[in-house]
Image: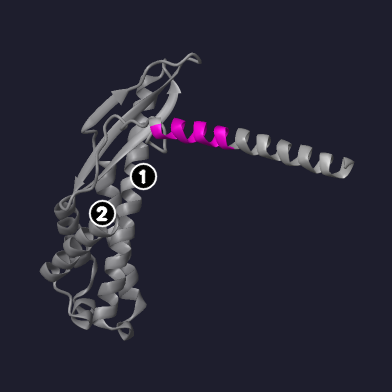
Amino acid sequence: MKKIFFVTISMAMITVLSACGAKKQVAQSSNNQGNSNPFGVVVAPPCEIYDTPTEFAATGIYRGSSNQKGELQKYALLNAQEIIRLKMKHAYKGMVSDYASSVGNNKGNDVESKITSAGDRIIDAIINETSACCLRFGEIQSDGHMECYTAIKISKQEVAQKVAQEVENKLTQEEKDRIGFNEQEYRKQMEQRFQQYKDEHK
């Protein structure tokens, strides 16, 4: 009899505990239904900007002392420039690789290295000359720091034109003949590669 009594009590306790757990899950579920955003509250950053088919774009962010607004602006710009530099060099490296494959690997790595370094030089020069198309400062925080947001954009067509001209100038006539270099065709391929980069990184 005692055994049946203990089994009955145990079953009753399990039923009560299960019911409490179910109520807790229902409460959590109803709370989640009230907030349909799984990421909580999100906002767009100031100076929000994105790549387009014709331009590379980036927003740089830097946090520092509110007494050094000039420094904040400088480092936010450097951050944006570095983001674009990585994108442009990645796209250009892929383009050079494709170009080298199209002319044949037996043409020599020396020419490919020259083409790569010429492009890298022009990309760096163009990026270093960029200026902000948007500048915003955040509120001063309790620690005296604030954020600075800077956006920049660079024409893909301008980059392709200047890089193609630089490659044209750096290659000797013998090297151009060896790979069948044509500046117009090279520029066209670069513009296509930059467009592909935008499509591949949406």
**Residue under label 1:** 82
Answer with the quarter of the image where residue 13 lies.
Answer: top right
Residue type pointed to by label 2: Ile
The magenta stretch spans residue 32: yes
> For the magenta stretch, what is the residue range?
22-33
Q: Is residue 123 left or right of residue 67?
A: left
Question: Is residue 136 placed above or below 21 in the rendered structure?
Answer: above
- Does the stretch in magenta take in 167? no
Viewer can see residue 75 = no
Residue at 35% x, 45% y is 83
Q: Residue 170: percent from the left, percent from the top?
A: 24, 66
Q: Few, some or many C-alpha atoms within 10 Å of disc 1 (few <14, some 14-19, many ≥20)?
A: some
Q: Position of residue 61 (x, y in %)?
A: 37, 33
x, y (%) of residue 70? Answer: 35, 22
Which is nearer the eye, 134 or 33? 33
Disc 2 designates what residue? 122
Q: Find the distance from the CA under tag 2 to the CA under tag 1.
A: 15 Å
In this rendering, would 54 be left or right of 59? left
For the residue labelled by badge 1, is the local secondary structure a helix, a strand or a loop? helix
Residue that extends furthest to the left in the rendered view of this protein? 184
Q: Answer with the quarter of the image where residue 25 lies.
A: top right
Q: What residue is at 31 percent from the left and 47 percent from the top?
A: 84
Q: Position of residue 79 (x, y in %)?
A: 37, 38
Q: Earlier in the sequence, mark 2 or mark 1?
A: 1
The reply to whether residue 175 is visible in this rendering is: yes
In this picture, residue 26 sits left or right of residue 61: right
Q: Quadrant of the N terminus?
A: top right
- Outermost residue toward the bottom? 106
Mark 1 is on which residue type? Glu
> Which is more toward the observer, 105 or 114?
105
SS of the residue at dot 2? Answer: helix
